[in-house]
Amino acid sequence: MAKEPVRVLVTGAAGQIGYALVPMIARGVMLGPDQPVILHMLDIPPAAEALNGVKMELVDAAFPLLKGVVATTDAVEACTGVNIAVMVGGFPRKEGMERKDVMSKNVSIYKSQASALEKHAAANCKVLVVANPANTNALILKEFAPSIPEKNITCLTRLDHNRALGQISERLSIQVSDIKNVIIWGNHSSSQYPDVNHATVKTPAGEKPVRELVKDDTWLNAEFIKTVQQRGAAIIKARKLSSALSAASSACDHIRDWVLGTPEGTWVSMGVYSDGSYNVPAGLIYSFPVTCQNGEWKIVQGLSIDEFSRKKLDLTADELSEEKALAYSCLS
Ligand code: NAD
Ligand code: LMR
């Protein structure tokens, strides 16, 4: 029997991530090849015509899984009945800016859209915040939508996770699919900590630690970390626009694994509400290693954290606490 369609909201759908993301969703990349979807697309009035153009293209592409499209500039209409909300709407940073420089514009959007989601989304709606500063926007959304369970509000650090896989794959000339269990800790910002201490590679001789195969701790502890931390800025420098296809693809990975589960023995990185695990202050949206099953994420527990890593986990937590205070000052 055919499945009931799932309603997926994409805010900022007329923007560049939106343009890459909506066809992926309509093709089943996010929720699977047998899951029909109804797309809800929200943007602001100056982008209404462009948004309608995206809707026209979705019709023209004749996606078999796409059972309907709502394209609107009304947040209530956009949020009504949605099961999944991918929050991309906002202002991207430009060359020379840090992600927190777009804070004041974006947190106020997340405060107001929190109430629309809280009041009108389907019960148990899963929320993924992509727009920067992603962790802090997600935190604001959580705080202003108190009836949405905190476990349902997450932010995107899967792009950073995938970037870490990409760098290791290039360094070792191996497939990304043979590497697993890298971790992005903390903020989706240049303070994030890409950690390979528990990452392994599938080889004909069994699973080997990434560190053993790379054989260059200096590269892993310095250049690798910096490259992943600064990759967003490098893309902006090269494209004069921030990342879009990789962000859209990673957003699909995030939701797919959350809804359909992570493979046995594999974890992924998600920005989730901290419960104090790994001595990260509770009450921040912080990127942790998580496994997912039955539509729920769980922080991987018990990983050893060496002194080098500890400092980096704390540094990015400190930045998130500062961002939280700054966000509240922007809203007051
Ligand atoms: P973009 O400027 O191309 O598109 C953003 C869209 O949001 C625009 O169409 C704009 O009209 C719309 N918008 C603005 N205010 C809105 C509101 N109140 N409600 C609904 N829509 C609104 O930007 P983009 O390149 O698509 O990037 C979107 C966001 O995602 C930026 O904040 C960017 O920094 C962020 N980003 C995050 C990641 C990540 O990994 N977390 C990766 C890439 C980009
Ligand atoms: C990215 O990581 O590519 C995005 O967050 C865009 C940015 O501002 O870096």
Image (tube, grey):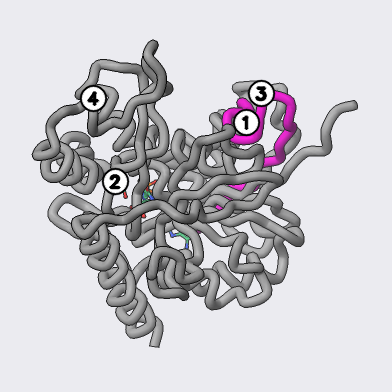
* The N terminus lies in quadrant: top right
Q: To which residue does mark 3 refer?
A: 63
Task: Of the two numbered discs 1 and 2 on the same chain, state the one appearing first in sequence.
Answer: 1
Which label sits in the foreground, 3 or 4? 4
State the separation of the CA atoms marked 3 and 4: 43 Å
* Region in magenta: 26-45
- Give amino acid for label 3: Phe
Q: Residues within 10 Å of mark 4 (few under 14, many from 20)?
A: few
Q: Do tag 3 and tag 4 residues touch (Cβ < 8 Å)? A: no
Say which residue label 2 marks.
195
Asked which secondary structure carries label 2, the reply is strand
Residue position marked by numbered label 4 in the rendering: 213
- Tell whether label 2 touches label 1 (CB within 8 Å): no
> Type of residue at label 1?
Ala
Residue 328: image location, x then y, percent: 38, 82
Across and down, in percent, residue 103 comes to: 32, 68
Nearer to us in this view, 278 or 173: 278
Residue 262: % across, % down: 57, 37
- Residue at 56% x, 29% y is 57
Q: Is residue 322 left or right of residue 225?
A: right
Mark nearer the viewer, 1 or 4: 4
Q: CA distance from mark 1 to mark 4?
A: 39 Å
Query: Residue 218 in the image: x percent, y percent?
Result: 9, 39
Q: Are marks 3 and 1 in contact (CB under 8 Å)?
A: yes
In this rendering, the answer to whether 24 lies above or below 196 is above
Q: What is the distance, in whole Å, between disc 2 and disc 3 at their CAs?
A: 39 Å
Check residue 74 for magenta coloring.
no
